[in-house]
Amino acid sequence: MTIAPDKPETAETPVPEGHVKLTIDGEEVIAPKGELLIRTAERLGTSIPRFCDHPLLDPAGACRQCLVEVEMGGRPMPKPQASCTMTVADGMVVKTQLTSPVADKAQQGVMELLLINHPLDCPICDKGGECPLQNQALAHGRAESRFVDTKRTFPKPLPISSQVLLDRERCVLCQRCTRFSDQVAGDPFIALLERGAHQQIGTAETADVLDLASRTTGGEPFQSYFSGNVIQICPVGALTSAAYRFRSRPFDLVSAPSVCEHCSSGCAERTDFRRGKVQRKLAGDDPEVNEEWLCDKGRFAFRYVQAGDRIRRPLVRNAKGELEEASWTDALRTAAEGLLKAREGKGGAVLTGGRLTVEDAYAYSKFARIALRTNDIDFRTRAHSDEELAFLGSTVVGTTPETGVTFGEIERAKTVLCVAFEPEDEAPIVFLRLRKAARKNHTRVVHLGQWTTSSVRKTFGELLACVPGGEAAAVDGIAQHAADVDAALSGEGAVILVGERAAEIPGLFSALVRLTARTGARLAWIPRRAGDRGALETGCVPTLLPGGRSVADEAARAEVGKQWGTELPAEPGRDVTGILQAVSGGQLDALVVGGVDPNDLPDPDLARRALDNAGFVVSLELRASEVTERADVVLPIAPAVEKSGSYLNWEGRRRDFDITLEGTGSLSDGRVLDTLAVEMDADLFTQTPAAAAADFARLGTRPNVALGASGAPNATLGASHAPNATLGRSEPGEGQAVLATWRQLIDNGSLQDGEPHLKGTQRPPVARLSAKTAEGLGGTLRVSNERGSITLPVEVADLPDGVVWLPGNSDGSAVRAALAAGHGALVQISGGDQ
């Protein structure tokens, strides 16, 4: 007979290759080699207290709060070990505070030590109510302290920058802030100063003020586009926001998940508000997009919603030519009458800005085709070209994270080439991924540009320098003049990133398509503005219908027209410049303008002439602007926090968000257009964002549009262009230079108004020249043309000779407004005093 064993035999769990088996609190666990003990415990559901540890920062072992008991080979280590710096090993036995009195006592002792000098100012500290030190002191601290001497005190607060304040006595020296600045942002301007009991966080400037040695900061001030992150990751109230300080408490706030409205990254955010006003924004946790980071523009630029010039009620121009408040009924009726008259006359056109949600953009696209019966619509209210439009239709529209380049692909890439794209200024979260890829994975980052910018330095990158406007020839010349780069792009895991500035450079999109076809590298377009991808997908361009369908395709028009219940216009429309020229010249009677600043356009004077000469102008706008000053009807619309919807980020990833501030009475663009269309006897079915999204989803997306030879991405450029030639522009003569320009992240954009703390961290506007070009010009430079001039301090950089760089929209340097010129234009240069 068979006798059952006392305990059933169990097969030992096999350990996969690259993994180890260890025991934590009596439970066997398999973990990948190199994983930190604190992470393995987290996966088991065991929370070990910590302050310095952060999953996106390198281990430091600075606070020692995460001590655990460890045995190796049956022999216990002589003292508890920091679980945030020790990696797992085969056969390791770990006891956390849950099962080890030794670990528990050690953690309590460390907590007592950390609290020796920590002030008991929780009732006034901004971190109170959401403070890890507070929580862990209650969970893992002692009820009484043996310390009876006077606590260390410092004058406070100490300004690290205009928007970050430091209370040094609260600091537990966890070094999260210094590691973030050094490792993630690449801005090592905040550091540990002094040693022992005098050790503290500071900058070179604070060291000078306090007469401390500044051995680690290099004498530079704390200047970073990402400084707000150190406030959020500080585990105590040592680093606080100047804008939020003493404004509220966490338990007074209502929190809502949201999406950043500023750039095309589509960062996840958390918006905290009270009494109908946004108090702060924090980074959301989204590993696939922004991980746990935000740029300062996304974090702090939200006060525009409460600006004094915000338009709350509709405005209609009266018989005296003055704008006066009107009811929605009267304003919509007046707008409908004017647009119907224009439709029956010479027609109307639609211009939209770059801040639209997908749903609002779809409403504009539908309004143009159904209510105005025109394809004269364009979202590219910036520099643009036919070649760009062909590229967007053939290469960009319809791409998704499944079919296109993603943040993760950038991080994993072996080689990345950035063309006409300054990532730190134009897509800062893309910049953080590039830096992470270069730092962690040794990604080779190559920048085709004019000078060694901060993006080049901080991504450990290489610069392929060329004259502005010569980028297309430089791309075609990579195989001949940069064979190693060409070979890298031909290898596995190569990515090319191109910015919207490429629209100003004839032939560049074509050259990039040829380069990708030859090398197999993946190509991604990264616009600067949040709404650009959504506007493209929904057909806010003159040659495409929603879903990437060609206006010239009869079957596509019939397909869309059938769903919309109308016949669509067959003639492709005009682009932004064509629309403005037509209105200015009397070929169009009306304009519908949604969130456009004339100073963003290639020729602001042309835009003003068009607005002045237009027979009828309807402006859908948030705040008073040059457009509303000239409009016949102004219809106020809701900012992002007062509506729901979605953005489509540069990856093609849908970023949904819900309404944050309810009950304000403001209406989305889609709702306003829907009601206006009803007054014009047309139905858009965009009453709500959900309705608009559902209507758009029913259309779906078609494959990329096949394009003709004119302006097509595969058009062949002439072979005579040398890599550094200026394409299609004259060479600079005596007293001339070629202009390089782009907008810096923190500048004079209207969505950054009302936040002086953010403006205080603007990079100083300077004119950059090569040493040879700067000879004899003095300390200031005057850049001019027949339209106007800009005068700025001179800074020497490694630009090609005969090139000058200016910030696009900073103090004293509004390039479009002053010069009506852009990247690659020929300008006059002289000493500022001449």
Image (cartoon, rainbow, N blue to C red):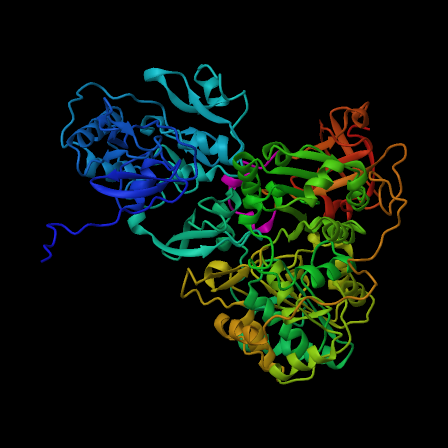
User: Residue 458 placed where, x, y %?
Assistant: 59, 33
Above or below — where is 229 with respect to 781?
Answer: below
Closest to the observer: 306 or 320? 306
Left or right, 404 with reference to 111: right
- Tell me if I can see residue 123 in this picture: no
Left or right, 618 with reference to 171: right
User: Residue 319 placed where, x, y %?
Assistant: 67, 72
Q: Residue at x 48, y 54 (%)?
A: 306
Q: Which region of the structure is painted magenta? A: 749-764
Please say whether residue 482 is one of the residues in the magenta stretch. Answer: no
Closest to the observer: 776 or 32? 32
Outermost residue, front side? 1
Residue 536 occupies quadrant: bottom right
Viewport quadrant of the C terminus: top right
- Tell me if I can see residue 359 in this picture: yes
Closest to the observer: 575 or 677? 575
User: Residue 148 placed where, x, y %?
Assistant: 17, 20
User: Residue 631 placed where, x, y %?
Assistant: 66, 65
Left or right, 649 with reference to 663: right
Above or below — where is 228 with respect to 112?
Answer: below
Viewport quadrant of the N terminus: bottom left
Disc count in the image? Answer: 0
Above or below — where is 304 with respect to 455?
Answer: below
Left or right, 806 with reference to 144: right
Q: Residue at x 78, y 41 (%)?
A: 479
